[in-house]
Image (cartoon, rainbow, N blue to C red):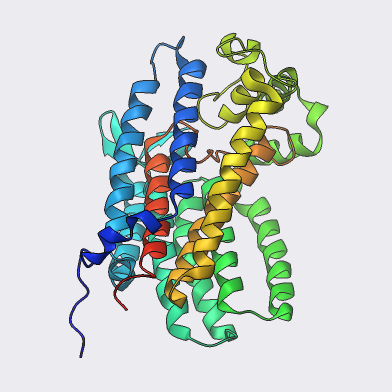
Amino acid sequence: MTGPRPLWPESSLLAQLSGMDWAIVLSAFALSLIGLATVYSASYELPLDFTPRQAIWVALGLVVMAVLFFVDYHLLTDLSLPLYLGACGLLGLVLVIGSQRGGAQSWLGVGPLGFQPSEVAKLATALFLARYLAEVNRPILSLQQIFLAGVIALVPMALVAVEPDLGTAAMFVPMLAGMLLVGGIRLKVWVVGVIAFVVVAAGVWLFVMQPYQRERVRTFLEPGSDPLGAGYQVRQSKIAVGSGQLTGRGYKQGTQSQLRFLPARHTDFIFAVLAEEWGFVGVVTVLGLYAVFIVNGARVALRARDREGILLVVGLLSFISFHVLYNTAMVVGLVPITGIPLPFLSYGGSFTLLAFAATGLILGVDVRRFVNR
């Protein structure tokens, strides 16, 4: 018989702080500082300065990261079912009393304070999937186990899609795919899964997507069809990115951002602001920091002490990596425009806290390869 898991790790953990992967911490912190500077540049002439708010979110994110680093991730996976059900309950509550912003009813809160339960749901789903797939403990998952894992991800995904926020809903897919890949899945099942995804995507296009969302996809396929309407955002974003050239126009000197041609420049299109002001050099620097974060996170997964830790890190890294991939591709017109923020850079409290929470869990998995053996 073993007793309940301790909330805080053994005292020997403090001796292992020097062995923590500081590259992950420093890259996340550096990206946050760059994000604060870019948010200020993109918004300082707006009626509301978003920089102080974002600074508060970054500070709170660092606290959340520290707390989740010290709390044993096994305790969180043990509690993953109630956390998951609670997150799904919040998503259901959003549909009843949530407030609407940006065309989606996706916020809960009182007055100016609010948060997006969809970000909480991502974290809770990753914990629950890690717990479920770790308990399977077999090299190849059965179809029933794959189906149940899919249902776990589909429930919050569907609730978010109904808001409607299809961009955020789609971010559950790379999380599920990454965890299933590590959990063990046959090639023929992947083929069937891709076919099923195409069928579901067709159904979403016909019966779920709103007219403005279909127009975004059409604009992506034919960028010049509506340059002053649906194609305006991506057109201005491409101009901003291209005008940065090698070293950029300089801090707060970008024409697309400072003259307000570029919409959503402190949130979804913050990467375009960065590219215009700092050029190719700035883009490579930021992408390099993301590479450091992701590569070192992958190393954490490789050296994790148990299957649960491996699955959790892979799930968290999968959706963070896909956020980076999709957002950077979106600003240059390679994928349709949707509300996918850039981790650590984009303005936004809920997603900033999620990014730091995921970082804390990843670091916690890493350091616990030394303790509680």
Vertical side of 268 occupied by 299: above or below: below
Q: Position of residue 240 (x, y in %)?
A: 69, 20
Residue 360 drawn at (x, y percent): 37, 53
Q: Quadrant of the C terminus?
A: bottom left
Name the one closer to the observer, 76 or 219: 76
Question: In this rendering, is residue 187 above or below 105?
Answer: below
Residue at the spot 30% in from the left edge and 63% down from the top edge: 83
Residue placed at 45% from the left, 34% from the top?
32
Seen in the picture, residue 78 relative to 330 is either above or below; the reply is: below
Q: Is residue 105 left or right of residue 320?
A: left
Residue 40 location, x and y as percent?
A: 45, 18
Say whether residue 230 is visible.
no
Number of marks in picture: 0
Q: Is residue 177 above or below residue 338?
A: below
| Picture coordinates of residue 272, whole percent (x, y) | 63, 26
Relative depth, front residue between 230 and 31? 31
Q: Is residue 274 left or right of residue 101?
A: right
Quarter where residue 10 is shown: bottom left
- On the question of residue 288 being in view, the answer is yes
Q: Quadrant of the N terminus?
A: bottom left
Say which residue appears at 60% left-offset and 79% top-offset. Answer: 184
- Residue sitting farthest toward the bottom: 1
- On screen, residue 179 versus residue 279, left or right, reads left
